[in-house]
Image: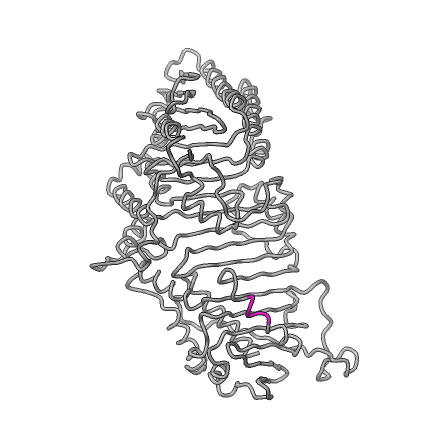
Amino acid sequence: MFTARVALVTAAMVVAPATLGCAKKTPPPNVVVVDEPQSDGAGAPGEGQTGTPTRKPPAGKPLKLRATLHGAGDLMTLVKQTTTAWTPKQPIDPAAQIQAMLLQMGFGPGLWASLDLAGPFAVDATFFAQDPSNDLKLAGTLAAVSAKGVMDGMPSGQRPQPLGNGLWELVQGELRVLLREKPKALEFALSNADLERAAGLAEEAGQGRRLRLRGTDLPPGMLETSAISGLPAGLRRQVLAVLREATAGSLELDAGTDRDLVLQLSADAPFSRLGLSPLGRRAPPRPRSKLSFRPARAGRGDAVGHPEVLHTALDKGVPLSQIPAPFDVVAKDAIAAAHAVLDQVQSDVVFALYLSPKGEATAVLAANVKDEAGARAAIRGIEQALAKGFAAFDSLTGEDKSAKINFTLKTDGTRAGPVKGDLLTIPVPKNMAKEAADLEPFLVSKKKLEAASFVTGNLAVFTVGAGATKVAGDIGGALKGRKTSLGADAGLRLARAASQGCHFCVSVDPAALLRLSVLSSAEARADKARLKKIETGAAAFTRIGGAVGVGVKLDPNLGSLAVGVPKAVLVPSPADAAQLSELFGDKAEPARPNDKPLAPKSSAREPTPAGPPA
């Protein structure tokens, strides 16, 4: 089916460049459709319109697939801008490449000129996955400046013939394709009934995200994937078991010269079997929490989630039966205290990892709690369990002073602004100084680990690392002064928008994480030249507002994973792109003089300090 092939190939070619993977100019594989004429009741049983016997359909339901696209021209412009910024010597121009491919395949130049690349493209198909050509139903629409121009641009031996009243027919062998001219579109289908369905596709294709692909009535196991191989083995098996039962799946992509890039993958499957529900109501993108914060000038990797999930993870993730005495009792006390803390959580939980300009790493855990006194008691239960564990360790070291931890726990022993907090200090045993070298970013003066905690009102905060007391003081001292929160963080905003309301919302600064990984290795820290490049690249990434958002939504029967990337990262100035390429290990091309960002200057977001609002 040549016209359907044109629709499918054109849709694929205007979308594929958005993945930056269209550098090769080889023509795509042909899409071959075999027509199965449908019976109109005039023929003998088991025969189609032409009297040709039809095959018996496979068992089960046919798969339904619908793909829509709009704004293809702007997507191709974005690809050109992005590749010009990142690889100025080898930019990719999708429009030019596609036109060259079409000419090589025998299409006339008028075909491309007759398409409306700002308008809607859509394909709707119903077929059996095990026998796609059996009882195939196909309909589609191409946005066109001139529908007649599109047909005239087809190879001379494969042009449709007029039927009158704007209808056309393309016949090749047993294949018959119907086409219909519209003022702004060319509709096509394999039957009259399907052609009537084509009329409603254009309106749907012009709405929502630019590229949408959805399949329903999926065969069992169709969504099994090796892409989750990085998950822990137990969780991976659970997720794969759920995906095997998926009945529907979708992919949505939104990107352009005027917007951030968003990619969302979803599946209709029994995600409740993961034991992570209920996770809350479906909700439109919104600030997740008023208790969140972000210290100034920090590299970050933030996550927001619901406490029910942590209860489950706590029970399943700690093998109490495998912990020997005397630490088994300590572990049980710690788990019980942790559950008590989670029971105090009123709404959201926030985890953040920060890296200061001086290379001090600090992890922060915060939550909105129900009762100040109850939450404080629960947190102190964890602290006391840890103290018992360290005391048990010291008792096993005997008289060897070099192996002792010599910890201290001071309740109300530190201040977080006007708020009193607890301070747990864990010195590194002298005989473990070498092993602790890689923990240096988290250690105070390379010698001890500190953890600070405080509870005030409905806010509970726990900090651990080299800047624990400093970060706790920063948070506590600014509780009434700041007007911003982590809920307004650029990366979390992207995560919420991409996932359309996430249960787990993560903001990642890749440059800061790379910097932390280098600082956490004694060997890597010795490479001063590499460290300097990383510092420069991280500063560039922060300057252009480079926070990446990742959002996960897990409702009982619907799960989705989404990623959001700022437009400023996709289209930096070539000078910034060169620094970032060196940062992540690629050989950078020299920047040209007087480089200017291709993205509007306003799209770059300068990081701003954020904390709990007044």
Vertical side of 276 occupied by 181: above or below: below
Vertical side of 186 occupied by 575: above or below: above
Task: List x then y, in percent, for residue 90.
Answer: 31, 64
- The one nearer the camera, 415 or 452, is 415
The image's colouring method is: one colour
List the single residue furthest toward the right. 45
Q: Which residues are magenta?
A: 200-204
Q: Is residue 46 left or right of residue 86?
A: right
Magenta-drawn stretch, dominant element (helix, strand or loop) = helix
Q: Residue 330 magenta-drawn? A: no
Residue depicted at x 52% and y 29%? 369
Image quadrant where one finds the C terminus: top left
Residue depicted at x 77% and y 77%? 46
- The one nearer the camera, 295 or 327, is 295
List the single residue furthest toward the top. 399
Q: Is residue 208 left or right of residue 134?
A: left
